[in-house]
């Protein structure tokens, strides 16, 4: 098969590409390198530098490779940034998907696995979030992803494009070989930011809000190891190719950890003290997001193998120690 991975040079996309690279399929990665890194793309995948909104480029690639499956990861993904510049998010995320789906329909490509987010649920009052929980995004990032989900669903109805939507919770860790990992510029994810303190790149950590309705007052999140998440994508592809119905899955560990607990666990792992400052809450941050992954376990047989906090932090710490400047060695 020929597989297109849009955004495949980014953090999550590159881990999926690495697993796909071990198969017999031909893999093409399209990425504009806004946040991705060409060095993260595992050979023999073919890398194309380009934007998902470039319809002429997409048309050329679809004509040349006759894709069977599309994975879509390309999106801006910072909650804080989306609150400041919502049009950036609707332009890149929503417009980019529309362009991709137009070309998929033009070339009769009927299979897409879409990278969504738990941010679509907003500030849910439910202790554990199901796929049928209320969807009320609190920020333009989550809103853009929910709009993208709905667009895909309508394209399924109208054009027969089959889909699996994977709603991730917090993704962390690095490939267990240590070859690829997390390298954002600037970094916005908690674990790599905290790891900058024991690496000497940051003096202290600021926790944004300590008055949330949680046990210690800091936000609670469900963390899934990026290797487990990549496994879920391959399972979703196999599921669709077997002719099963389009659907949505949560992907998480079903266990919540607070920001303070993450910092304390990193102190244990690195044996370094991490000074903490407290700041004001960030707009758009829900107090708690914990997944129910029962559906994906029941339907796909997917079970996370590495999603305990020690495994996540150990692999992330190893990556950052061995790549202190990320992919810029």
Image (cartoon, helix red, strand yellow):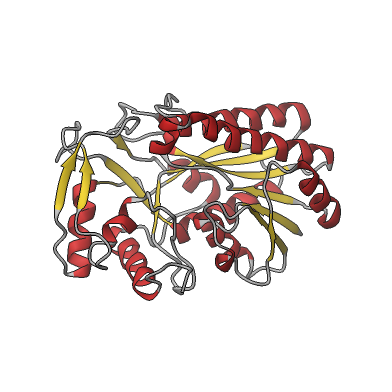
Image: 72 above or below 80: below
Horizontal arrangement in the rendering, residue 1 relative to residue 132 (left or right): right
Q: Is residue 322 left or right of residue 51?
A: left
Is residue 200 depicted above or below 210 in this figure? below
Q: Quadrant of residue 247?
A: top right
Residue positioned 45% across, 34% down in the render = 82
Residue at 64%, 72% in the rendered image: 43
- Quarter occupied by residue 234: bottom right
Residue 308 percent location from the top left of the image: 31, 58
- Residues 147 and 169: in front is 147
Image quadrant where residue 196 sits: bottom left
Identify the residue at horizontal 69%, vertical 34% (top origin).
98
Residue 134: x, y in percent?
Answer: 42, 24
Does residue 263 sit above or below 327 in this rendering? above
Percent position of residue 228, x then y: 46, 58
Asked whether the viewer can see residue 245, the reply is no
């Amino acid at each position: 098969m020929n597989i297109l991975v849009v955004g495949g040079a980014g953090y999550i996309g590159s881990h999926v590409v690495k697993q796909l690279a071990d198969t017999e399929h031909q893999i093409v990665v399209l990425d504009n390198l806004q946040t991705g890194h060409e060095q993260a793309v595992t050979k023999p995948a073919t890398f194309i530098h380009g934007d998902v909104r470039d319809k002429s480029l997409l048309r050329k690639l679809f004509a040349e490779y006759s894709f069977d499956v599309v994975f879509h990861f390309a999106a801006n993904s910072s909650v804080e940034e989306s609150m400041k510049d919502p049009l950036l998010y609707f332009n890149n995320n929503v417009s980019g998907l529309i362009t991709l789906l137009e070309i998929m329909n033009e070339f009769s490509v009927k299979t897409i696995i879409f990278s969504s987010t738990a941010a679509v649920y907003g500030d849910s009052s439910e202790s554990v979030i199901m796929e049928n929980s209320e969807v009320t995004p609190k920020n333009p990032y989550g809103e853009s992803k929910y709009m993208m989900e709905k667009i895909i669903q309508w394209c399924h109805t109208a054009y027969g494009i089959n889909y699996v939507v994977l709603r991730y919770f917090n993704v962390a860790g690095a490939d267990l070989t240590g070859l690829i990992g997390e390298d954002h510029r600037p970094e916005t994810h908690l674990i790599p930011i905290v790891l900058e303190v024991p690496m000497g790149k940051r003096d202290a950590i600021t926790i944004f809000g300590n008055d949330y309705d949680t046990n210690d007052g800091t936000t609670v999140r469900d963390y899934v190891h990026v290797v487990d998440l990549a496994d879920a994508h391959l399972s979703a592809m196999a599921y669709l190719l077997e002719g099963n119905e389009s659907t949505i899955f949560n992907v998480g560990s079903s266990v919540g950890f607070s920001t303070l607990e993450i910092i304390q666990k990193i102190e244990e792992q690195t044996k370094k003290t991490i000074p903490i400052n407290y700041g004001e809450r960030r707009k758009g941050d829900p107090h708690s997001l914990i997944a129910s992954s029962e559906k994906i376990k029941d339907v796909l047989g997917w079970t996370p193998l590495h999603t305990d906090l020690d495994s996540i932090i150990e692999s992330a710490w190893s990556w950052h120690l061995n790549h202190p400047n990320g992919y810029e060695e």
